[in-house]
Image (cartoon, grey):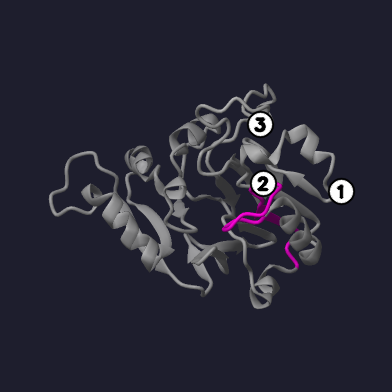
Amino acid sequence: MKVTFLGTGTSQGVPVIGCSCEVCRSVDYRDKRLRVSVHLQVEGKSIIIDSGPDFRQQVLRERIRTLDALVFTHEHKDHTAGLDDIRAYNFIQHRDMPVYGEERVLEQLKREFAYIFSGVQYPGIPRVALNPITEAPFYAEGVLFTPIRVKHYKLPILGFRVGDFTYITDANQISEEEKEKVRGSKVVVLNALRQEPHISHFSLQEAIELLEDLQPERGYLTHISHLMGQHREVELTLPDFIRLGYDGLQIEV
C-alpha cells in the first residue's frame, strides 16, 4: 500500500489567515498545511479518505488521475467541503463516484450539497453513489475497511484500518475495545492538534502516549495546528518511531 498525506492541517489550515506567528511565517514547506486528507493506493485501487476545502488543490498537486472511491470519517466541513470537485472524475471515468459514510454523514451531505440530490439534475453536477456504513467492516470497491469508533468530543466519528495501516483523525477518546482493532497495525496515523490539551482533539503528549500504548512500527501525527510549533523543532522532541506528517509525505505500508 502507498499512502500519501494530502493535507495534515486543522480546520483553518496553516498558515492561518491574519496570523503572523513564527509557524505561519515559516518558509519550511512542512509548515504549510492544507486541510486533513489521505490518499490510499491499495490492491490496484485509488481511494481518498475525506475531501476537505483543499481537495482540488491536493489532487492536482499529487497528480491523482483516477479515483475509485471517497470515504468519510465524519461530516465536518473541513472534511467534506471539496465533494463538488469529484465532477472531474465523473467526466474522466464515466461513472458515479462511490461515496462511503455513516448514515448521519450522508444525510448531512444531502443537505449541504442539495443540488447534487435535487430532482432537477442540472448538467455537469457531481454524480455520487451513496453507500451507508456502520461500525461493521465493509468493502470500498473491493478494499476491506475496518471502522474504528472514536469520539471527537461528543461526536462519534470513524477512523479506519486497511490492512496494516490505521488512520484516525479528529479524536480525543478511544475505548479499550476499539484499541484492540488497531493493535498489530504497522503504521498508525493519529491526530495531534497542539501542545496544550484541547476539548475535541488529542494533544501532542496524549497522541504520543496512545501511540506508545498501541506500539506500531511507525506512528505519524496529523491534523496539526499552528499552535503545535515549527515542524523541525517539534520533530526533535518525538520518540524515534513517531514523526510529524506533512503535506505530500508518501509512505509504503
Give the secondary structure at mark 3: helix
Assess disc 2: are there few (<14), some (14-19) or many (≥20) residues with their C-alpha within 10 Å of its C-alpha: many
Q: Earlier in the sequence, mark 3 or mark 2?
A: 3
Classed neighbour count for the residue bearing mark 1: other residues with Cα under 10 Å, few (<14), some (14–19), many (≥20): few
Q: Which mark is residue 189?
A: none
Residue at label 2?
A: 194
Label 1–label 2 contact, CB within 8 A: no
Which quadrant of the view contains residue 4? top right
Q: Could you say whether the residue bearing mark 1 is in a helix, strand or loop? A: loop
Of badges 3 and 1, the one in the foreground is 3
Q: Nearer the viewer, residue 197 or 90?
A: 197
The quadrant in which residue 124 appears is top left
Q: Residue furthest right?
A: 240
Q: What residue do we see at 78% from left, 53% from top?
A: 218
Q: Real-space Cα distance between discs 3 and 2?
A: 13 Å
Residue that badge 1 annotates: 240
Residue 89 appears left or right of 211: left
Kind of residue at badge 3: Asp
Q: Answer above or below: position of 22 versus 250.
A: above
Is 5 placed left or right of 240 in the picture?
Answer: left
Tell me what residue is drawn at x 60 percent, y 53 percent: 42
